[in-house]
Image: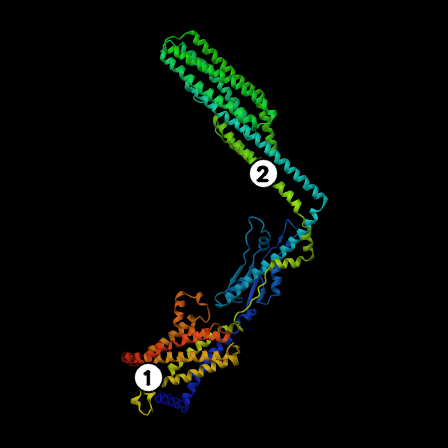
Amino acid sequence: MRTILSIAFNDLRRLYTNVMAGIVMVGLIAIPCLFAWFNILATWDPFGNTERLKVAVANTDEGHTSTITPLSVNVGDMVLSQLYRNDAMDWVITSEEDAIEGARSGEYYAAIVLPPTLSDNMLTFYTGAAEPSTIDLYVNEKKNPISPLIVSAGGEGVGSQINETFTRTLSEVAFGLIETANDFLNEDETIRALDSIEQRTINVRDQLLSGADTVDALAALTESSVPLVDGAQRIADAFDASLNQIQPADLGDLGTQLGTGAGSLGAALAATADSYSQVGDRVDELLADAGATSQATAGTLSDIAARIDVQATQYTTLRDRLNNEVIPALPAPAQPPLRSVAASLDDTIARQTTVRDHLNDAAARIGAGRGSDDDRRAIAESIGAARDAADSARQTFDTTVRPQLESLAGSVQGVQSSVDKARSDMAGVATALDNSPGSLRATLATTGEDLRSMAESMRDSAATMQDAQRSIAQARAEGDVSELADLIASRPEELADALVEPIAIDRQAVFPRASFGAGMTPLYTVIALWVGALLSAVALRTDKESVVQNVVDPEDVTTAQEYFGRYLTFVVTGLAQSTLIMGGLILYVEISPAHPFLLFVAGWVSSLVFHMICYTLVLSLSNAGKAIGVILLVLQVSAAGGAYPLMMLPEWVQNTSPWLPATYSVWAMRAAIFGTYDGDFWKAIGMLLLFTLPFLLLGLWLRNLLATPIGKMDDAVARTKVLQG
């Protein structure tokens, strides 16, 4: 220990007695102080001087005049009037061209251009095509790296101010409308008008429901005629290839007459009657053909009988649907004519059955060789009776049913003219029918489907009318806004302000700081201490000859004595640097630390550790150690976490931070300046002291192992005659 102190006292004596050495030591102590104080004071409150930033504002807003309320608003002018009273920045009101060109030239840090459609877009938000307004912000990012962030925040502030002005204006207008609406709803004439509207809604709903039932019945009747057309066509096809298809009569414009189904059914009955005439002719030809074999004639008659049976079955299906579905769905006055049609169909079915039986009997006798003229007469009579029955059914339908169905169709059109939606649906059905194929069967099928769809749409419209009626009734029962109007009339501006800012934020600082510069103090102070340690390691000699010079027994000095003896000189230098820096922070910079003594402790410990690291690196690795010290300085500027939150930095920086001594120095100084929590100061000091262990190992043991290669490296550098070895 005596040798260590002897080395230290010898160093101090030489520094004290040599004027130049004293000047160098003063510089070593003063430079870190100036570095810390200058940077902290320079960044003390930069955001408090944003009023010096010139930002151009150009208003091209053309304003908006509402067609709903007597309201004419120019949001751009409102914004400019607010900016005149805003001293957050140096706002320059100018033209669009000057603003953009000024931002490019650097005259302005930024330019804000309010678009011509600003008011229109903001005050037509209730329309489906409305789009949010966009404010153009031109920022000169070349002029300064920080100013774009500041002026961008200013641009966002202008946007917020526009939103605030818009909300306040809209709220005041809306509150005025509520008060006016209350006066209007309480007038006698308005009450009578609401009564009339409600009753008319009920009437339209009832008409829609009645019309839907009628359309459903007509659709069922139309669909029932499709099998008749199919049966008549199959019978005609069996006799002659020219009758391969039945060509129906033109059904007319389906879009304007819902009586298409009635006409189609009549056409089907007429086609059936015509087919029986063809059956009679064909039977006469078969029985008169002497060259035909009895078996061929019998087979043809049996085939005709089978087709007649199919048609009788289809007529039976039509009669059953009339009796079970169509007639019950109609009003009582409309049922008798259709019952007459059903009775005619019963007679037709009976005649068809008789024709079928006579054909089968004749086929059996002819096949057995017992055919006679009586068979021909019986068949002819039955076919004629069946044809007459079909004609009778058609005539009954044409004279009694068709007029009533056409009248019902006219009633449906009357309902459609009362409701726009139902009229649109009917037009759609008419268009679809106009485009349908020309065959009778396709026309019937398409007509039935469209009628069903129209009936469903009419029921939907009726439900809409029902909802509207209920809404009107509920609004009248609960729509007393007089109390709300009284409240609004008393203080509309206060309520509008409350809508603009419904919530106020009370910011409570935890571990408050005096300014932005105070927040940056830990980083700048730690970097200054590291710079001081690195300068000391470069300026003070560390070779053994300089250390043991003038010691009593130089040969007896051990590696540890040599290491700690010269390190005490670094300790004195480091303590002087840290004491002066911390004292200046408190007395000159006036950072007002929460724990002044702990701030000194953090400075002393940081300086001693930093000096040991830099001293050991230069002592053990020579020039390479100096380079490593500079590299550590560069890393610690960003990775120590003194400026940006580590979570915002790249992952490799986050991973590097725990292995840097400056990280824990920053932690300790933050605790001393802003306040401690759960022993965080002493934890940081403990982690910082752990960095001394590997460097003690390097300086006391590994240095001897590296002495030979490091010496050769220094000799090689010295031989260059340019670099210092």
Q: Position of residue 429 (x, y in %)?
A: 53, 33
The residue carrying pointer 2 sits among few (fewer than 14), some (14 to 19) or many (20 or more) residues within 10 Å by Cα, namely some
Label 2 sits on a secondary structure element that is: helix
Which color scheme is applied? Answer: rainbow
Q: Is residue 241 visible?
A: yes
Label 1 sits on a secondary structure element that is: helix
Relative to 655, residue 372 above or below: above
Classify residue 419 by image quadrant: top right
Q: Position of residue 574 (x, y in %)?
A: 42, 82
The residue lying toward the viewer, choosing from 715 and 537, is 537
Judged from this view, the residue extending furthest toward the front is 678
Q: Position of residue 587 (x, y in %)?
A: 52, 81
**Amino acid type of the residue tagged 2 in the rendering:** Ala
Q: Which mark is residue 463?
A: 2
Q: Position of residue 329 (x, y in %)?
A: 56, 28
**Amino acid type of the residue tagged 1 in the rendering:** Ala
Quarter that holds the C terminus: bottom left
Relative to 60, residue 9 above or below: below
Q: Kindly identify which residue carries mark 1.
A: 560
Q: Is residue 622 visible?
A: no
Going from the N terminus, do you reach mark 1 or mark 2 first? Answer: 2
The residue positioned 67% from the left and 50% from the top of the image is 481
The residue lying toward the viewer, choosing from 293 and 368, is 368
